[in-house]
Image: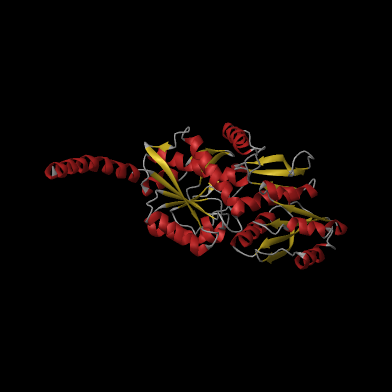
Amino acid sequence: MRHLSIVAAAAFVAAAVPALTASVAARADDLKIALIYGKTGPLEAYAKQTETGLMMGLEYATKGTMTLDGRKIKVITKDDQSKPDLSKAALAEAYQDDGVDIAIGTSSSAAALADLPVAEENKKILIVEPAVADQITGEKWNRYIFRTGRNSSQDAISNAVAIGKPGVTIATLAQDYAFGRDGVAAFKEALAKTGATLAAEEYVPTTTTDFTAVGQRLFDTLKDKPGKKIIWVIWAGGGDPLTKLQDMDPKRYGIELSTGGNILPALAAYKRLPGMEGATYYYYDIPKNPINDWLVTEHQKRFNAPPDFFTAGGFSAAMAVVTAVQKAKSTDTEKLIAAMEGMEFDTPKGKMMFRKEDHQALQSMYHFKVKVDPNVAWAVLEPVRELKIEDMNIPIKNKR
């Protein structure tokens, strides 16, 4: 009996090994995508939208199968809390321990800048979404970096075109880190071509909630200037500088406020600024194409709300991944780079294209005017005009 038990056990193990090996091989053959994002911390709202958009984009691009090139897609998420040191460690772990094929991230520009050398060291693709700082595809860039998110120059040029005209005097308010400083630098460069005058630049810590002192400095700079006077604000996360500045009554000095687009909760503050103009990366009701139609319909159905700013970004990153793998017929890094340079891909914003020189996605932006609808919780961004790829001369800022 004992002999028979041993024989039976051996037979069971022998039968189980191939099945176990097949299971391990199947898992190893998953197409792994890492999402590095600030799921907790100051950019939590942005991160959650990116994740939602990424998953919906993968679903749309794979027609609901969540398989690509015969491989099951597995998304591995890692929270970096928008901290550079945590982001760097999370990305290294994704490449080295999790064996991901492609990584996407992250929410903070400072964290994304820390991630760039990690991609280069591991010789793996990092699609930057949604961090904006110009340096990411500029002086800090390397060939493993692609970005679906817009950069500071795209934000700045579109906003400069929207509000900059001869006879207009503008002062800027921005956060004192890469996102804010790069944004103002690009805005300043673009504004010079519009005939407008830049009178002052103010930078404050990202955690600022009291804008009394900086607001008064801006008012003092502009109040005696002739013609139209505007404070342009570039901001990410909390603090709500627009509302705080508006509470200080800039109109008594004939000063207007302006800023780019933002997430829907932040657009609630814009309701106090009817007629304000600026330029935005995305507002769900502006792009007219089948992908955006699907995204808006499905998002409304699933979440009882329209898709937001960074939902479109996550979706665009997913479309880039699927298009790249299909074009390369591989997840080999060198084959992906060859496929992605100059690659066009469809997104909720329409067509994007990875520029060969710096891997920045060229894309449309939207000049808007704020309209207040009492039946909508946020300010409606009415389109003035679409600023297409060919309408914006986005500088190449890398030195390679």
Residue appearing at x 39%, y 60% in the figure: 121
On screen, residue 288 above or below 354: above
Q: Nearer the viewer, residue 248 or 333?
A: 248
Name of the residue lying farthest toward the front = 1
Left or right position of 34 against 241: left
Q: Position of residue 216 (x, y in %)?
A: 80, 66
Quarter of the rendering occupied by the N terminus: top left
Residue appearing at x 53%, y 39% in the figure: 56
Residue appearing at x 49%, y 42% in the figure: 318
Residue appearing at x 81%, y 58% in the figure: 247
Q: Position of residue 354 (x, y in %)?
A: 50, 45
Q: Position of residue 394 (x, y in %)?
A: 59, 50
Q: How is the image coloured?
A: secondary structure
Name of the residue lying farthest toward the left = 3
On screen, residue 278 above or below 57: below
Total marks drawn?
0
Q: Nearer the viewer, residue 398 or 183?
A: 183
Name of the residue lying farthest toward the right = 252
Q: Is residue 400 visible?
A: no
Q: Position of residue 289 (x, y in %)?
A: 60, 33
Q: Is residue 202 visible?
A: yes
Left or right position of 314 against 122: right
**Residue 11: quarter of image:** top left
